[in-house]
Image: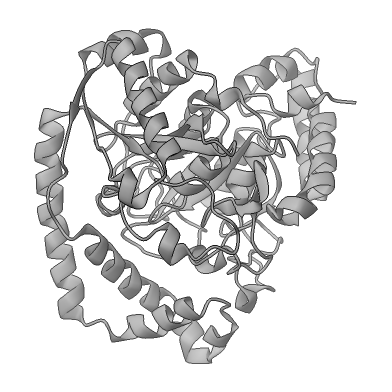
Amino acid sequence: MIEKDILFGSLGELRPLLRRRKLSPVRLTEAYLERIRELDPKLRAFVTLMPERALREAAQAEKEFAAGLDRGPLHGIPYAAKDLFAAEGAPTTWGARPFSGQRFDRDAAVIRKLHDAGAILIGKSAMTELAGGPPAASATGACRTPWDTTRWSGGSSAGSGAAVAAGLVPFALGTETWGSIMTPASFCGVSGLRPTFGRISRAGVMALSWTMDKVGILARTAQDCASVFAALHGTDDEDDATVAAGFKPSWTHAAETLRALRVGFVREDYTRWGEPGVAAAFAEALEVFRGLGAHLEEVTIPDHPYEAVAGTIIAAEEAAVFEPLVARGDVKGIIDPARRGELLGGQTITAVDYLRCQRIRRLMMNDFGNLFERYDLLLGSSTLQCAPPVDADLSIVFAGGNTIEAAENLLGLPGISIPCGFNSGNLPIGLKLLGRPMEEARILEVAHLYQSMTPWHTRRPRL
């Protein structure tokens, strides 16, 4: 029987065991499947398990290791994919009842890349319907954080965050349009990388907003996120938004790099919008960075209507994406009344308003370009509150604050959320690091350095 410690292992810990054949990919996959079957009824992190495919891929990895073939750091590693990634023959429901019977005859581009890297797709993780909405707005019900199963794991990559945090998989794929990787990473106490817009192909992935959707990764550590990102980034003819850029993090020189950086931090109004534990954890994280020699300076982000612009762009693009759903009358199958109204109301946004928002977006890009001439890295709180109860009113939970979240998504900036503490109720708290476009290596290096000096990412929930 595989020990629980192994199931919570990082990629860096699992890889040598697999490569030296001290750990069987088949037995590892079976152990994760057993753990999912035992614990997922409490969490609802998975929509579909894929044991036949998983065990077939695991057996292939085992044969390859026996033959001396090593495909790299993901070879023989099971993972989950948010249920908006197409997986050949498997249900891909997009978290929504109207699409419960939907299947595709081809894997998404990232699934194919992970297959080539030797990773093992174990199942499809839960999400809120059409990548938006409150906890209950999911075809499989509210997904719970393993730190307290009365509380939400965050949207919309809810299942991916919960699955990694609970030791059901070492890593999972997610997507973010506006907070959908950062939020579950924060609520579940895992590392969540949202790359620069266009760094990873979205071919075979449900579209919500063509100009804001990003594919990302939830994993145990920043280094694990880097290993998966290394296998996924690059151009793809099937996604004309993809771009080519180098990626070569230097873990050994991270401390030296940080001392040379100009680091800004965004101090939110925690008294009004957040909770004391989050404010205290953020202040403590800043002290860790100061202790590492970082030059910190409080910043105020350029004054623009980020949330209004982001909301208009998403609503307009979402309305175009799901116009057939509305035309068929199937919008009535959407659980969340507000989302039904959004899908219908988005049809009324004028081209003038949409284009005006895109022009304002260009001004925002220019101003942030100026900001990043003064700072190499920005720090902030991933969320201003910890995981809320699954029946909480999200209009209150997310009523305000987190002033940079809409901006970073509108501008397609790379970011990572990592654990930086726990509140008095033992719920995890997230710290986010933001960088210039294409500078994933830098934010991952600094995040890894922070994790090497703190214990938060090593904590495990008691299920």
Pick the residue in front: 135 or 332.
135
Position in image of residue 322 (x %, y %): 45, 77
Position in image of residue 215 (x %, y %): 45, 48
Q: Is residue 184 visible?
A: yes
Q: Residue at x 26, y 81 (%)?
A: 349
Q: Quadrant of the C terminus?
A: top right
Total numbered badges shown on the rendered structure: 0
Using the image, determine if residue 103 lies above or below residue 237.
below
Left-right relation of 51 to 249 = right
Left-right relation of 416 to 117 = left
Q: Is residue 64 visible?
A: no
Position in image of residue 99 (x %, y %): 62, 74
Using the image, determine if residue 101 lies above or below residue 151.
below
Q: Find the residue positioned furthest to the right.
A: 1
Position in image of residue 394 (x %, y %): 47, 63
Q: Residue at x 47, y 51 (%)?
A: 175
Q: Quadrant of the N terminus?
A: top right
Using the image, determine if residue 244 lies above or below residue 127.
above
Left-right relation of 254 to 92 = left
Which image quadrant for residue 60?
top right
